[in-house]
Amino acid sequence: MAIYAIGDVQGCFRALRKLVKRIKFDPTTDRLWFVGDLVNRGPDSLEVLRYIKDLGSAAVTVLGNHDIHLLAVWAGVARLHRKDTVGPVLSAPDCDELLTWLRHRPLVYREHDYVMLHAGLLPQWTIAQAEKLAREVEEALRGEAFVDMLPFIYFRGSQASWSTDLGHQDRLSLATNVMTRIRVCTPEGEPDFSFKGRPNDAPQGLVPWFAVPGRATARDTIIFGHWSALGLFVKKTLIGLDAGCVWGQELIALRLDDRKVFRASCSG
C-alpha cells in the first residue's frame, strides 16, 4: 500500500487524471491525501469533486480556503467572485450531495507521524491545540446550524490575534483563517493574510509561519499546500505541495514512504 500526498488541485481535473495515471494509483490498495482547495479557478471543479468523493476511503482531503468559499456561496453567506469557476458545481443535480460531503471533510488530519492541513499553523500552537480548534470548526460545519455558523467560519478579516480567552465565534474565525490562509506571521505569532509572494519578498517583520524560532510544532511532520509562490518545499518535517497547477505549472504527488516526487504538467 502506498500513500500519495497531492497538492492543490483547484479544479484541474485533467492534470489530476494525468498524475493518478503516472503514479499507477490503485484505489483498492493505495490512498490519496489532498491538501485542500479541490475547487475553483480551474475549469473542472465539478469533475474533481465527483472523482474524489467516489474514491471513498481511498481518498482523504482537508478543507482549503476555496472549498470553504464554495460552501459559503452554496449556503448564501457569500457571493461568487469574478474569477470563481464553481458555477457548474452549484448548478449540478448532485450539488447538495457533493457539498454535504465536502462540509464533512476535516480541517486537520493526523495519521501516524503526519499532520495534514491546507495552509499552516500559528507558531505558538501545539498539534493538540490545533486539533482541538479544528474539531470546533468541523463540528460547526457538520451541525444542523452550519448555515448560522458559516459567517463566523468564513470571516475574511486580516486582523486577528490568538488568545486562550477568545470566545467560540472568534475561535472559529481565527482557526479557519489560520489553517486555510496563513503564509506568514510575525515572530510573535501574529498572522498576516494578505501576503502571497515568495518568502524572501515578505514585508519586514513577517516570516513564513514555519520559520519562526521556537515553533511549537517544529518536531511534527506537517503536510500543507496553499502557497504557490513557495512551490514544492520538502524538508525533514515540512512538506509543501502547492506547485501552482492552476497557474499552468505542475500538480505534485509525493509518496510518503520514500518521498519520491511525481509531477503532472498543468499547461494544456
Image (cartoon, helix red, strand yellow):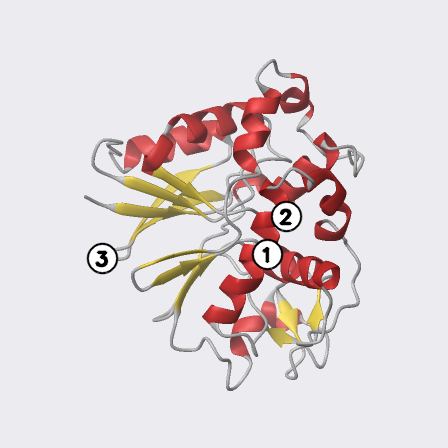
Residue marked by disc 1: 136
Q: Which mark is residue 140?
A: 2
Report the amino acid beneath label 1: Glu
CB within 8 Å, label 1 to label 2: yes
Report the amino acid beneath label 2: Ala
Disc 2/disc 3 C-alpha distance (Å)? 37 Å
Q: How many marks?
A: 3
Dot 3 or dot 1, earlier in sequence = 1
Report the amino acid beneath label 3: Asp
Q: Which mark is residue 258?
A: 3
- Which quadrant of the figure contains the N terminus? top left
Disc 3/disc 1 C-alpha distance (Å)? 34 Å
Q: Look at 29% across and 35% down and name the residue there.
A: 22
Residue 151 position in % (x across, y down): 77, 47
Question: Circle 3 — which element?
Answer: loop
Instruction: Tell me if residue 46 comes above or below residue 244 in the rendering.
Output: above
Residue 65 position in % (x across, y down): 63, 48
**Side of 140 where 21 appears, left or right:** left
Residue 32 position in % (x across, y down): 35, 41
Disc 1/disc 2 C-alpha distance (Å)? 6 Å
Instruction: Tell me if residue 213 comes above or below residue 125 in the rendering.
Output: below
Q: Residues within 10 Å of mark 2 (few under 14, many from 20)?
A: many
Residue 216 position in % (x across, y down): 49, 80
Question: Circle 2 — which element?
Answer: helix
